[in-house]
Structure formats: structure tokens, C-alpha cells
Amino acid sequence: MVLTDINVIKRILSKHGFSFSKALGQNFLIDPEVCPKMADLGGAKDGTGVIEIGPGIGVLTVELAKRAEKVVTVELDTRLIPVLAETLSDYRNVEVINADVLKTDLFKLIEDNFNGKSVNVCANLPYYITSPILMYLLESRLPVESITVMVQKEAADRLCAKVGSRDSGAITVAVNYYAEPEVLFDVGRECFMPSPNVDSCVIKLNVRKEPPVKVENEEFFFSMVKAAFSQRRKTAANGISSGLGISKDKVSEALSASGLSPTVRAEALTMEELALLSDNLLKVR
Ligand code: SAM
């Protein structure tokens, strides 16, 4: 069964009375080259385990199953479960879980299914929850080697931007803290059914063993980063002061102790500078 063939997709979906849900971000891949490439670059190989999020009708799942020892895939839409039972019936090494990935205990999933194997995440993400999913995976420090995901092109630019560059945002800092992001390849809107009105990109987050900077208080560091980036056209000091309720004088003091200009913008700050500023703010607040 060729799951990128539009006629095959239409036949299976109509047999199961399925119609696409925009709310669940259902755009299924129909380009035969994308999934094999994603599976290869995503580290699916002999002896490894893969967690997939949102299998749809299983087009990426089968490519992962051909390469990895075991694939566990989490699909929220109950209507797709009988479809997947049909499309994945040849693959004994796939387990489908009908659940919301954001409410799934992925630590338990790994413990129950992968038995010490190296695990990677590989997914064509539902775009409406790209950031919550990535942050859930990274912040929980899930024991995975890498996270290879298809995201909107715009999101890819932000997630993979260099910290301290114009495109960076609070999420860029968070992603770079937990992982080394890398852009793999672009995927045009014509590669999906139905075709979305944005282009996409596959990125890989290579999970770090240790963060690139050491901070006194991780929670405070991330609150400060969020506040600093909250008012994009204003200075970092303004955002931090209003976001964290710390007086402008104290923020200026911490900026000065960190060797930074009082008018610096958040997107100009490097990871090291943000870490130092957070430690100095903790001292003066
Ligand atoms: N992997 C398929 C493909 O590439 O053709 C489908 C990808 S589609 C962009 C996203 C999939 O994620 C859909 O199947 C959708 O039902 C599922 N999904 C949406 N929200 C989800 C959630 N919270 N947890 C798990 N799956 C979800």
C-alpha cells in the first residue's frame, strides 16, 4: 500500500468515513521522498526506538518501522485508529497509542517500550501545538537523542535562529539551552493533502547532555528570558522590569554589572550574556 498515493489515501479515508480536521492540524504528506529522508536523518536504525507524534494514516510511521527496532506512535484522533490498524498491519514493531501527546507520560512510554535502547523522536507535528510539544519534550528532559520534526517554515527560522541574532526569540533561547538545532530540508506546501497555506521545514534538535551555560536558577533564567523578549520593539530592560516586577534601577544595575548597555535589546544578547544577566539580576532584585 503506497500511502503517498492520493488515490490510495482517498480510498482508505472514504472507506473509514474520515474527513480532515483543520483544528487537529491534519495535513498528510503525499510526497514519496520526504518520509524516507526524515526517517534516515532522524536516526531511525537497527537497535533504536522511535517515538512518533501524530501518525495520521501512517505514512511516516511505515518508514520509521522499516528502519528502527520499535516505533511507538501517539495519535489523538480516535477516527484514525482503525485506519492505522489497516495501514500498519504488516508492521509488528509498531504500537499505536490513542492519546493527546501533551497528556502522555513519555517517560513511562520509554520505560515500557524501549528497554535502554537509544530513542529518537520523529514527527510531522500538528502545527497548532508545535511549541508546546517541543517545550514539553525538552523541558521534561526526556531521555532521547534527538527530535526531528516537520514544522512551519517560519517556526523553523525562529527555532533554529542563532541566539543573539535578529530572528531569535524566547523559544530560540529555550531550544538552544536544551539542544543544538539544525535545519535539515525545506518541504513545500504542495507536498501535503490538503495543501496548507504555508511552507514547511524539517529540523533536528540534537539534545544536549549539558546546557551550554550554567545558571544559578533555571526557572528564574527562563522567566527573565521570556520577559526580556516580551516587548520586541522595546529594550530588554523594559520587558524585564514590567514582566518580572523589578524596578528599572535594579535592572540597570544588573545590566551594568553584566557589562551590558541599559538600552540593549533581547535579540542582541548571547546565551552567555543572558545567563550572566540572570545571575546578576538574582543578586540585586
Ligand atoms: N504524520 C502524518 C503525515 O505526515 O502525513 C500526519 C501529520 S499531521 C500534520 C498531524 C497529526 O497529528 C494528525 O494526524 C493529527 O490528528 C495528530 N494530532 C493533532 N494533535 C495531536 C495531539 N495533541 N497528540 C497527538 N496527535 C495529535
Image (cartoon, rainbow, N blue to C red):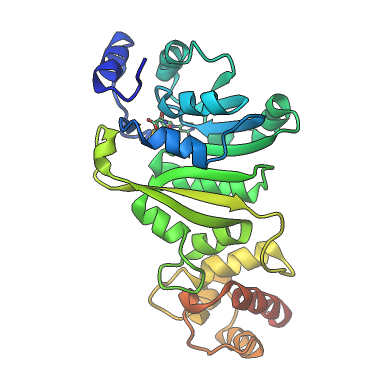
Residue located 74% across and 70% down the image: 216
For the C terminus, which image quadrant?
bottom right
Q: Nearer the viewer, residue 45 or 146?
A: 45
Can residue 124 be spotted in the picture?
Answer: no
Please give left or right for residue 170 compared with residue 219 in the image.
left
The residue under the point 71% across, 25% down is: 112
Residue 190: image x %, image y %?
Answer: 24, 39
Toward the viewer: 204 or 97? 204
Above or below 250: residue 16: above
Question: In the figure, 274 relative to 153: above or below?
Answer: below
Q: Residue at x 46, y 31 (%)?
A: 54
- What is the tally of numbered marks visible in this picture? 0
* Left or right of 224 on screen, residue 85: left
Residue 110 lies, in percent from the top left, at 68, 31
- Ligand 1 image position (quadrant): top left
Q: Residue at x 46, y 39 (%)?
A: 38
In the displayed structure, 231 sits above or below 155; it is: below
> On screen, 42 above or below 225?
above
Q: Is residue 217 left or right of residue 170?
A: right
Percent position (x, y) of residue 87? 42, 15
Q: Quadrant of residue 119?
A: top right
* One can see residue 132 in this view: yes
Where does the N terminus fall, quadrant-wise? top left
Whole-percent x and y of residue 101? Answer: 54, 33
Judge left or right: residue 10 versus residue 215.
Answer: left
